Structures are given as structure tokens and as C-alpha cells.
Image (tube, rainbow, N blue to C red):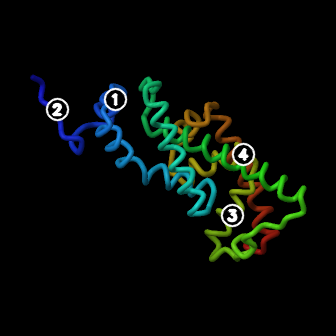
Amino acid sequence: MAMMLDESEASDAELIGRAKDGDRGAFGKLLERHYDFVYRAAYRWCGRKADAEDIAQEVCVRLGRAIRDYRGGGAFTTWLYTMTMNAARDMMRKTARETVKTEAYGVHALISGEASAEPEGTAEALWVAVRQLPDKQRDAVLLVYGEGLSHAVAAEVMAISETTVSWHIHEAKKRLKTLMRSAGEV
């Protein structure tokens, strides 16, 4: 009889293999091991704790359905980044649809103080400005500067070329200068 490794000693690859075979303990350990990583990426993307928690929870649910499809061609964390960014985009689209519906009926947002809160410090103002960038520019900046990924890994996550990531970063820097000047931060 083969001896099973304790989940705390198992590698991601071992946990993934066991989770694919229906081992709930292995799946739970995989979630526990990577939840903070997913939450951090979600927070950088949206900038709000509650939204980041919702996104991270959605990724956990999606991971439960998708783990069997993971082929291991790239790093597991790269796959998680992609899943997290897709969940964040889906949430943003849903929020935008709800906002349009709300405005169409003439109802104002229930929580007005939260949106008008002034960011504390230049770093927070910068992340607020990053979240105003077009999708691809924002994603490139968040992955490279927010998460510290190389342009090559960011390209893999975004499913574009490394050169395109560099171009998005370049364009983002130009746009961020303008946004920060208009916000009075530069």
C-alpha cells in the first residue's frame, strides 16, 4: 500500500493530481495554500476589500469546477492569475450593468461616502489611477508592478506577447502621468 503524503508536505502538483481524483482534503489544502495569493491579486485589481473577497470566493468556486481541466502546461499560479483576472472582469461587468439599471430607474447609489473617500497618500492615489486605465494596460501594470511578475509571465497570464505587455506598460505610464497630474498628485 502506497503511503500518502500529509497535505502540508505535498507539492502543488501532488495536491492537484489528488484534487482531480476527487480528494477534498487535497483540494482544501490547495485553496488554503493559494487563497492569500488570489485575494492579493483581486485586491490590486479592484482596490476594495469587500470586492476582493467576493472575487477570491468566486475563484474558489470556479477552481472547484475547473481543477480537472488544469493540464499543468504552465505554473499553477499563472493559471490562478488568469482565473482571478477573469473573475474580476466578470464582477466589473456585472457591477457596470447594475449601475446602468440603477441610473435608468433614477435610484442613487446606497453607499455614497465610500466612493468619495480621498485616497491616502500618493501610492494609493496611483493605484486608484491604475484602476482607471483601459483593461489591457491596467492588467499589465497590476501584474508587473503590483504582483512583481516579469513581462514574460505577465504575457502568459494575459495570453499576449511579451512585446505587447511592454507596449501596454509604456502606454499606461503616459496615461498615468496625465491622470496623476489631473488629480494633483504629480
Q: Amino acid at mark 3?
A: Val
Give the residue pinned by disc 4. Answer: 135
Residue 108: image location, x then y, percent: 83, 67
Judge whether residue 36 can be spotted in this image.
Answer: yes
Q: Nearer the viewer, mark 1 or mark 4?
A: 1
Give the residue pinned by disc 3. Answer: 128
Q: Residues within 10 Å of mark 1 (few under 14, many from 20)?
A: some
What is the C-alpha distance between the residues marked 3 and 4? 14 Å
What is the C-alpha distance between the residues marked 1 and 3? 41 Å
Give the residue pinned by disc 1. Answer: 22
Q: Secondary structure at mark 2?
A: loop
Residue at 61% x, 53% y: name it: 45
- Tell me whether the residue at label 1 lies in contact with that at label 3, contact meaning CB atoms closer than 8 angstroms: no
Q: Amino acid at mark 4?
A: Asp
Residue at 35% x, 38% y: name it: 27
- Indicate left or right for 50 with 95 as reference: left
Residue at 47% x, 44% y: name it: 60
State which quadrant residue 82 falls in. top right
Quadrant containing the C terminus is bottom right
116 vs 105: above or below = below
What is the C-alpha distance between the residues marked 2 and 1? 15 Å
Give the residue pinned by disc 2. Answer: 4
Residue 162: image location, x then y, percent: 61, 34
Q: Earlier in the sequence, mark 1 or mark 4?
A: 1
Residue 17: image location, x then y, percent: 32, 27
What is the C-alpha distance between the residues marked 1 and 4? 36 Å
Q: Amino acid at mark 1?
A: Gly
In the picture, the disc for residue 177 is none
Q: Earlier in the sequence, mark 3 or mark 2?
A: 2
Q: Secondary structure at mark 3?
A: helix
